[in-house]
Image (cartoon, grey):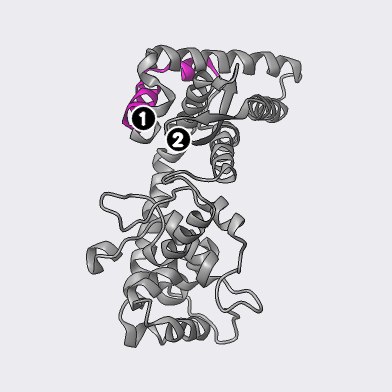
Amino acid sequence: MLAEEHGLSYEGNAQNFRILMFLEKRAGSGGGLDLTAATLLAVNKYPYCLDDPGRIKGVYAMEWEWIGQLRQKWDMPEGCSTLEAQLMDLCDDIAYSTHDIEDGIRAGKIQMNRTFFEDERLLDHLVQEIVNDQGNLEVGWDQVDIRSMVERVLADYLEQWETIYAECGKEASRTRREMKARWVSTFAGRVGIIDDPKKGWKRVTFVRDEEQDLESLRTMEILKKLAWVTLIKDFRVQRLQKRSEIMIARLWDSFKVPDKGRLIIPPDWIESYEQHKSKWTWPRFVADYISGMTDAYAEKVYAELFASKSGSIYEMD
């Protein structure tokens, strides 16, 4: 909506820095959390200015001015993130490929039987997701037959489940937890640091025999895609996604006109806008307010504005 109506960009990683550096409040700080340089750079997963041509992920120009100066002081190579940021990124992927699958099994979206794991439609979806993921080409998919590897990883995963299921007295909940624990241990045990000659920097990745372990990286990606196609692509999840989009769009329409919006936005937010309006436009301010909402708070505000049940002046914001 920012892009369509005002030509402004919005991106989740960039918004993180607005929260950390300006929007979140901390006693004694003029704005933001007053974090150390090490912490800010450790959060900087995509070390680019979002205003650069063709850039999809990065940091807004206002925050990049400061982040860029930090990177220069730290003598960081262009386009390289700190080891801490790389480690957090890899841990994030490990969590997707282990915890999310456990959620899928518990929700019944991933059925632990051969009929499910050998379903042609599931295999087709997994292969297509891998092929379409242009941000994951560095794991060497061109070196393997993708479908054959997908079939092998799923078969091995199911075989491991059946073995642990028997060891756990055929108790599904214990088996889920044990499977997750073993995969987390396996992946975490392969994390290491190697030289990255192309970038003149270091890379945090899976390592085997002092080289990048592409086999483990591809295996992790297949398990991530399994969680993605069975959970995120589930039609009920997509309905919830659509519901959220509708809510956010209606909240946006309620706040986007300054004269009317300022009457229904909390006073401390309006005070912050008045303090920074020379640098922040009203549309950016509204985006800050909405994107900073928790799910529960967004539901509350939406209900106050659009639900038939009226609110109360005695409710705390």
Quote the CA–CA distance across marks 2 and 1.
9 Å
Label 2 SS: helix
Question: Residue 258's image quarter?
Answer: bottom left
Q: Is residue 125 above or below residue 151?
A: below
Label 1 SS: helix
Viewer-proximal residue, 273 or 311? 273
Viewer-proximal residue, 309 or 116? 116
Whole-percent x and y of residue 59? 41, 57
Q: Is residue 155 magenta?
A: no
Q: Is residue 122 magenta?
A: yes
Pick whichever of labels 2 and 1 is earlier in the sequence: 1
Whole-percent x and y of residue 21? 52, 67
Q: Is residue 25 above or below residue 267?
A: above
Left or right: 207 with respect to 304? right
Residue placed under numbered mark 1 in the picture: 129
Residue 1 seen anywhere in this rendered image of the structure: no
Magenta: main secondary structure equals: helix
Mark 1, other Cα within 10 Å: few <14 / some 14–19 / many ≥20: some
Amino acid at the residue labelled 2:
Trp
Q: Which mark is residue 99?
A: none
The segment highlighted magenta reads: 113-133
Whether the residues at callouts 2 and 1 have beta carbons within 8 Å, the answer is yes
Q: Is residue 16 above or below residue 27?
A: above
Amino acid at the residue labelled 1:
Glu
- Residue at 75 percent of width and 16 percent of height: 167
Mark 2, other Cα within 10 Å: few <14 / some 14–19 / many ≥20: many
Whole-percent x and y of residue 65? 42, 64
Quadrant including the C terminus: bottom right
Residue placed under numbered mark 2 in the picture: 228
